[in-house]
Amino acid sequence: MSSNGRMTPTLAPASMREVMSQFATGVIVLTVGGEHIHGMTANAFSSVSLEPPLLLCCVSHGAVMHRAVSSERRFAVSIMGADQEPLARYFADKERPLGPAQFEPVDWRPGPRTGAPLLQGSLAWLECELSDSYDSGDHSIFIGRVLNSTRGAGQDGLLFFDGRYRRTAAG
Ligand SMILES: Cc1cc2nc3c(=O)[nH]c(=O)nc-3n(C[C@H](O)[C@H](O)[C@H](O)COP(=O)(O)O)c2cc1C
């Protein structure tokens, strides 16, 4: 409701998506290990707090990942480097296999703290335990407490802007 008492018009999903596409983000793959092994490309990701170290990722209620994180309560984040666009596309593709078969074509190692897949060649990795979750609209905000973090050797990042993958310019 606005201050003059009228209903605030709702922004259509397509308009929301189009406007938000002008906000450049990095790209991550969120992963869960164990019984609910799964991976999903995401860009609704942010750090939240330094002490304690907390981050967030927003996950659609309709995503397989939603149940995986809610059930396993531990997850990992692989931050995509400039050369990992094919991996980002793969983990956003609804046609990919589910379960352990999903990771057969992928180079990964289990995270030491969570068992969640850490994707080789990423810029950095974070392992988290689920600290809080908030339902908000059609997504949940999952807050992860960081248990472990590692930097990789790569330098250039994968970006998502205006509906397209791009890469950071070196230098
Ligand atoms: C660049 C990019 C960013 C995305 N970011 C998110 C996100 O932050 N949260 C989300 O729920 N889905 C996001 N998606 C959509 C999911 O990756 C996609 O729907 C995926 O197939 C869902 O996987 P699942 O249902 O198997 O878990 C994004 C897709 C792309 C291409």
Image (cartoon, grey):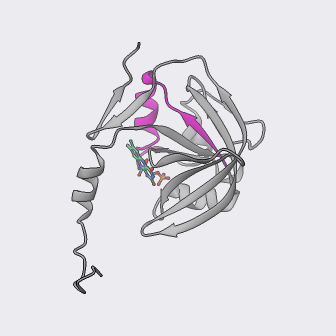
Q: Would you identify the image quadrant in which residue 101 lies?
A: top right
Q: At which x and y percent is residue 142?
A: 58, 58
Q: Is residue 80 inside the magenta stretch?
A: yes
Q: At which x and y percent is residue 119?
A: 59, 31
Q: Is residue 137 inside the magenta stretch?
A: no
Q: Would you identify the image quadrant in which residue 157 lies?
A: top left
Quarter the C terminus occupies = top left
- Identify the residue at image location x=54%, y=48%: 98
Q: At which x and y percent is residue 126?
A: 65, 38
Q: Nearer the viewer, residue 107 or 126?
A: 126
- Which residue is the extreme one toward the top? 171
- Identify the residue at image location x=45%, y=49%: 44
15 lies above or below 79: below
Q: Would you identify the image quadrant in which residue 153 lies?
A: top right
- Identify the residue at image location x=60%, y=29%: 124
Q: At which x and y percent is residue 160?
A: 35, 36
Residue 2 in the figure: left or right of residue 93: left
Residue 165 in the figure: left or right of residue 126: left
- Which residue is the extreme one toward the front? 3
Residue 68 in the figure: left or right of residue 83: right
Range drawn in magenta: 75-97
- Identify the residue at image location x=68%, y=29%: 150
- Which residue is the extreme one toward the right? 113
59 lies above or below 11: above
Quarter the N terminus occupies = bottom left
Counting labels gives: 0
